[in-house]
Image (cartoon, rainbow, N blue to C red):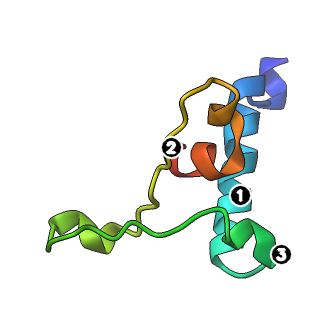
């Protein structure tokens, strides 16, 4: 199966979430996905301001960590 260059399952899931995040930020996905993620806005001027980061919401349970609004900025 190595000759097929397939990604492992966890890497495929991360890749799919990355593609969905990119398309959401590029306005190619529905608006409701854009409401789930928000850009990182630091309270003061930092070097990371220009890196197009996303804010990571709090997730107390492992179920909450599977949510698109949490997993998208983390990945």
> Seen from this angle, which residue lies furthest top?
1
**CB contact under 8 Å: marks 1 and 2:** no
Query: Cα distance, mark 1 to mark 2?
Result: 14 Å
Image location (x, y in percent) of residue 34: 68, 72
Residue 30 disc label? 3
- The front one of 63 and 23 is 63
> For this view, does 52 lie left or right of residue 67?
left
Residue displayed at 66% across by 34% down: 64
Picture quadrant where residue 25 is located: bottom right
The tag earlier along the polypeptide, 3 or 1, is 1
Picture quadrant where residue 67 is located: top right
The tag earlier along the polypeptide, 2 or 3, is 3
Q: Is residue 47 above or below residue 64?
A: below
Image location (x, y in percent) of residue 70: 59, 45
Query: Cα distance, mark 3 to mark 1?
Result: 14 Å
**Element on which disc 1 rests:** helix
**CB contact under 8 Å: marks 3 and 1:** no
**CB contact under 8 Å: marks 2 and 3:** no
- At label 3, counting other C-alpha atoms closer than 10 Å, the crowd grade (few under 14, some 14-19, many 20 or more) is few
- The front one of 26 and 71 is 71
Residue 19 disc label? 1
- At label 1, counting other C-alpha atoms closer than 10 Å, the crowd grade (few under 14, some 14-19, many 20 or more) is few
* Quadrant of the drawing holding the N terminus: top right
Residue 51 disc label? none
Residue displayed at 62% across by 33% down: 65
Whether residue 24 can be seen here: yes
The tag earlier along the polypeptide, 1 or 2, is 1
Residue 74 disc label? 2
């Amino acid at each position: 199966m190595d000759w097929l260059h397939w990604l492992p399952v966890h890497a495929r899931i991360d890749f799919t979430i990355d593609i969905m995040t990119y398309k959401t930020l590029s306005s190619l996905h529905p608006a409701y996905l854009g409401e789930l993620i928000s850009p990182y806005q630091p309270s003061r001027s930092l070097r990371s301001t220009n890196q197009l980061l996303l804010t990571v919401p709090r997730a107390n349970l492992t179920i909450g960590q599977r949510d698109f609004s949490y997993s998208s900025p983390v990945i």
